[in-house]
Amino acid sequence: MSDLDDLYQEIILDHNRRPRNYRPMTGATHHADGHNPLCGDEVTVFLHVDGDVITDITFDGQGCAISKASASLMTTRIKGRSLGYARELLDEVRTMMTGREEEQPDLEKLGDLAALAGVRKFAVRVKCATLPWHTLEAALAGQQRVTTEEE
Ligand code: ZN
């Protein structure tokens, strides 16, 4: 295992042990429930959007280490940023997790999120990592519920 793999593993373990922004939100402007039946992950994403800015984002629910770490990383990266930034990041994560080899994700933009790339080797885990992002997308689109089965 390379040093980079060790670092990535450490990021995921850390966010699983101490998930950031892990609490329900009262007064959310957007929220959605995400379900990944393959693994049993359930995540609810709450957002408070003011104009073009995501002033707060939290998540709640029960899931495996990968889904929880992915949700935690997502909240730390998107809190305080614009909706446009969130959508760009969503595209980068999608490219990283499900893109073809000729589509290279922007690792600089991904930052800590690149830690999730390691799960691409395990097809069943990809949906754990992408679940919080699908749920974010659903919440912003005004959908209340999303499942990974639709892919
Ligand atoms: Zn999972």
Image (tube, rainbow, N blue to C red):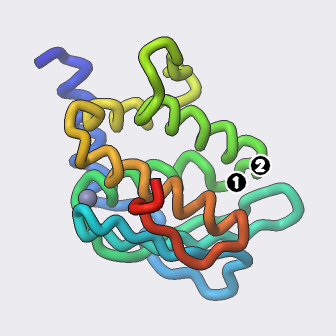
Which residue lies under the disc numbered 1?
80
Of the numbered discs in the image, which one, if any, rests on residue 28? none
Q: Amino acid at mark 2?
A: Ser
Q: Residue at x 52, y 17 (%)?
A: 103
Of the numbered discs in the image, which one, if any, rests on residue 82? 2
Quadrant of the rendered image containing residue 60:
bottom left
Q: Are marks 2 and 1 in contact (CB under 8 Å)?
A: no
- Tell me where residue 85 appears, x and y as whole percent: 72, 41
Direction from residue 143 to residue 39 in the image, left or right: left
- Tell me where residue 129 appears, x and y as whole percent: 36, 49
Q: Residue at x 39, y 62 (%)?
A: 149
Q: Is mark 2 within 8 Å of ligand 1?
A: no
Rendered-image quadrant of the N terminus: top left
Compared with residue 122, is residue 40 higher up or lower down, i.e. above or below? below
Residue farthest toward the bottom in the current orientation of the protein:
26
Q: Amino acid at mark 1?
A: Gly
